[in-house]
Amino acid sequence: MAEPVSSSFDFTAYLAKARKRVEVALDAALGPEKPNQLREAMRYSLLAGGKRLRPILCLAACELTGENSDHAISTAVAIEMIHTMSLIHDDLPAMDNDDLRRGRPTNHKVYGDALAILAGDALLTRAFEMVALRSPNVPVDRLLKVVGELSLVAGAPGLVGGQVEDLHCEGKEVDLDTLEFIHTHKTGALLKASVVCGAFIGGAKEELISALRIYAKGIGLAFQIVDDILDVTASSEVLGKTAGKDLIADKTTYPKLLGLDESRKRARELIGNSKKAIEPWKNKAAPLIALADYIIDRDR
Ligand code: FPP
Ligand code: MG
């Protein structure tokens, strides 16, 4: 085990403060949308709590560049909007057909399929509005990079592609390469973009961007491996979503292919490599290093 970069860093306090900051910004990002039921459906899922890991990673990456992370708050919100819309759509009957998310009934269970689809669409488009039109004091070339990165990871080369492969592989024999494709696209891509976009907003140089891409690739895959593990080992109450769903839907997962111990080992290795990639930035990297540990130690 590597020595912690900064033993004085209070991660619990950092996480609590960052979550609060994100919650306030998310609330403020949704205006008086009309009609009312659209506003309610958007707010229902966006403000339902959650770990807020992606926006916090975005802010932490911006901080690492030395830039004031207030400049990254709209991008952080945008990323959580994209994440939330992907979960609304993922839970639909045509996809995973889930009825529990973040400890409450899924969006379509409350508002119906049509409104759930449209609330997701509205969150996705609002995300790009947040970056393009609601990011004051950020140079346009940085915003353009963020828009480019987010359009790639949300679309066919990222979440959509990963989700299509995931659905296509249900009930089929899947090898490790295919599973890794699904995980890195469906989940890893947006986690990676969270980090990279925070660094773009901070105007990071290529050396840091490259290190952060390595960091983020590792945590992205590790995150989904841990998700697979928790699906087997945790309860619905703790997870806030239906536990054991992968087995019911006959999805291939890391525990199914490698077993629980080997899956944990693989996730630990990935997190170790991620941390190593940003160690040269020493204490400035402490939040991202602690966030990497959190990804593997979390219970939900
Ligand atoms: C949850 O995975 C689902 C995702 C991480 C992404 C799903 C992606 C889409 C529905 C495409 C969204 C479209 C755009 C344009 C971004 P899971 O089912 O393994 O996890 P769960 O147990 O939390 O449901
Ligand atoms: Mg699902």
Image (cartoon, rainbow, N blue to C red):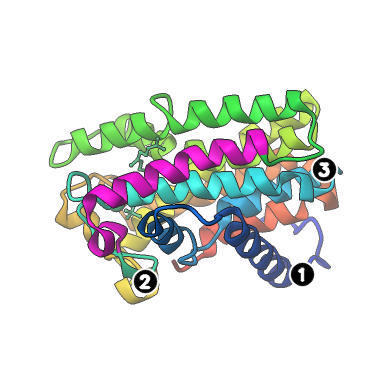
Quarter of the image where the C terminus is located: bottom left
Q: Which residues are magenta?
A: 106-133
Q: Which mark is residue 10?
A: 1
Residue depicted at x 31% and y 61%:
231
Q: Which circle, 3 or 2, is nearer the viewer?
A: 2
- Residue 185 location, x and y as percent? 41, 34
- Mark 1 and mark 3 lie on one chain; the one further toward the N terminus is 1
Residue depicted at x 53% and y 64%:
297
Any part of residue 217 in sight: no
In front: 155, or 36?
A: 36
Main secondary structure of the magenta stretch:
helix
- Residue under numbered circle 2: 103
Which image quadrant for residue 159?
top left
Q: Which circle, 1 or 2, is nearer the viewer?
A: 2
Any part of residue 96 in sight: yes
Q: CA distance from mark 3 to mark 2?
A: 38 Å
Amino acid on which disc 3 is placed: Trp
* Mark 3 neighbour density, 10 Å: few (under 14) some (14–19) many (20 or more): some
